[in-house]
Amino acid sequence: MLSRVADSLYWLGRNVERAESVARILDVNYTRAMDLYSQRDGRSEALWRSVMQCAGFRSQYKTASNGKAASDVFGYCAFDESNSTSIVSAIRIARTNALSIRAELTTEVWEVVNVLYLYVLDQNLASVLREGPSRFLRRVRDTMQAFAGTSDATMTHGDGWSFLQVGRFLERAYMTARSLEAVDVEHEPWHESQRLLEMCHASVPFAQSSHRAPDARDALEFIVRSQDCPRSLRFCTREIDLAMHRISRSAEGTFANDAERRLGRLRAIFDYTPIDEILASGVPQFATQLVREYEALSSDVQAAYLPRLPVTA
Amino acid sequence: MLDIQPATAALRHYDELYEAGGLPRPHYAPLAATLDWIGRDEIMARVQAINTALLLRGVTFTVYADSAGTERVFPFDVIPRIITPDEWGRLERGIRQRVRALNAFLHDVYHSERILREGHIPRELVYSSKNYNREMIDVDVPRDVYIHVSGIDLIRDERGEFLVLEDNCRTPSGISYVLENRDVLKRGLPDLFRDYAVCPVDDYPARLLDVLRYVAPTGSAQPNVVLLTPGIYNSAYFEHTLLARRMGVELVEPRDLIVVENIVYVKTTQGLERVDVIYRRIDDDYLDPLYFNPDSTLGVTGLMNAYRAGNVALANAIGSGVADDKAIYRFVPEMIRFYLDEEPILRNVPTFDCTDPAQLQHVLANLDQLVVKNTNASGGYGMLMGPYATAEERERYAETVAACPRDFIAQPVVQLSSSPTLVDGRMVARRVDLRPFALFGRSIEVPPAALTRVALRDGSLVVNSSQGGGSKDTWVLQA
């Protein structure tokens, strides 16, 4: 398939997943902030700072006073066009990528993206906050899940599909690693583990598999090493690896490029390393290392298949 | 529902719906009855649903004059335009004849120049055409086909006769609206089709692909066909995606192609892959910066050499624009007589030649009754509708024409025929034209997939989408 098309499918996958993740993270934190933290004490600001960190903005945000943190962070993460990873930006980028490969997409898949794009164009921060952000965030998440279902059911599962999967699961693993980086399980083991599970859509699956209230170590193990939870690092990394091997047609357990080599190493960590050993050096340190690994992995994928193309005027 | 008044005699134009006596023409009568039966409110509700569907599908075009390429839905009028089998039969024969002559003309001007040597068309007119391309002299194009796809614009005069308004021999667009209009109308207002046997349009992409495969350079049993688009900001991008998808060929941008030793390749994740046929939707000027516009960032360097070496086929051929130059237009009937030894089936609109001093005088003295068109423009840009312009506009235009007569032609204002159209919930008469598409491969075919454009503004005679025009589903009835 065309390198340019592969590139667009990869970024389409990443940005669709990005919009869904940011929507979920905002929703979880917005609702948690309402009952758990008083608007006036410092914990609320700390919560929103960690949301900023999750979404990938470490330094820019200065703590707002007077309980404005919620709407500031929400505005920045959902609607700010100057922030290339806000929900609106992610949807716009996804739509531009979809448009540039319109001929490769089924009508159904294109419409899912286009309809959401037209919807968010119509929304603004003030009105969304006035009615409560849940409906807006729900619409974004629903649509992005419809994207997953529609693309699965209507696209042929060839190389194009695999590039879409690489983008989706790489972004998902990346966001899980960022969530892991942002929580503070050391000081607030119960609340922060619960928040982590919710941000990864894993609180019920965790409860079902462990049959008890979350203990920080178990929750971390679940998010890192669960075989079946579709947002665990192990699961996502395996999906990226399988998609990459489908594209390169090399055998599992071997590698045809740097991306596959890095994936093999990551999989070994998740598959074989005991959780206590993984966490021995500290959760934030481990998480930061993973964030870097996935950033490097993205470069490896592009180096293998997506040669830099001259930009058209 | 159909409470519109038959056209008043004062306007003197052909009414597609009503006969002179005020009764619907027989082929429109069942449609009129169905519309009445459905009722105004229901139709308006359906129209809304259809417009939403078009927006979601992204059936849009880009308006250049607007800020940075605004996407707009191409307005769609749900009342179909109906063409009888007899009318279509004549159009089909006339268009086949015309395209055959235009193609022969292109081969001739780039080879022996017989028509110029024998004095039927002035040499300087051809050589001064912006789209005459010296690089094409003595180049043999695959199967001698230059105009693989053409769109012939027709209008009906006051008496109902179809006249050719202009030929489009480069990259005519509009077929995607034909395909989408039919699809949304069948879903949105299925009742309208109840009493009619309408020729299907959906085999157009397959027929186009046949043509493209036919012209592949010999030797490739499974020719690799691609559709070359300038990219997402082009006004017809939606059409490019639709055709590529329906033909099952790759939609490529110039940056996806590379020429190595006169062979064209496309860059894929598995390496370079050879390309045999390019259905290009990019103008000549932007194809190859080595030959044409060196400032173009759009082109594929070396494409012209690969083409001249016969290693790749281009549809349409480079240089075919000289055949649809507005200054050449008035010679098309002559071409038909010269190359085919036949009388033209379809007539031209009378056209004044501004390079002839006597005719130029006449044009300048009668600007208030004429349409003047710039020979280097299209899409309704840069033209003067004499009767509707202000005296000042006419004066300014006259100066431009006098300064460079070669760039202008003038025609009497033809009162386009009108067709019932839904505007703001009311059925009103609006002017229409017709663009059938001809495909030239093994033979010349005119699929029954024609675009009807409609001037949505009251009294307007300009149907171009860039000037507030819309479109209608066009029904060619089965014989």
Image (spheres, rainbow, N blue to C red):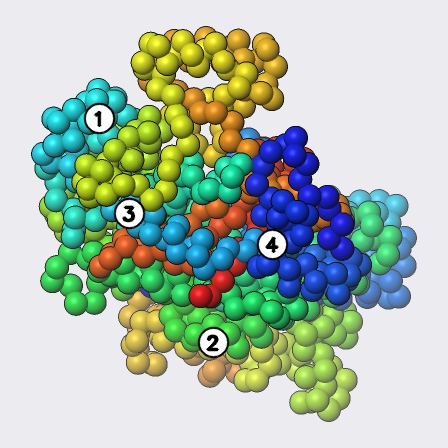
Mark 3 sits on what residue? B97
Furthest-front residue in this view: B21
Q: Is residue B234 left or right of residue B92?
A: right
Mark 4 sits on what residue? B25
Secondary structure type for disc 4: loop
Q: Is residue B441 left or right of residue B374?
A: left
Mark 1 sits on what residue? B121
The chain carrying label 4 is B
Quadrant holding the C terminus of chain A: top left
B131 w.r.t. B448: above or below: above
Question: Can residue B303 be spotted in the picture?
Answer: no
Secondary structure type for disc 1: loop
Question: Can residue B344 be spotted in the picture?
Answer: yes
Mark 2 sits on what residue? A239
Q: What's the CA distance linking mark 1 and mark 2?
A: 68 Å
Q: Nearer the viewer, mark 4 or mark 1?
A: 4
Give residue A182's quadrant in the image. Answer: bottom right
Q: What's the CA distance linking mark 1 and mark 3?
A: 19 Å
Q: Nearer the viewer, mark 1 or mark 2?
A: 1
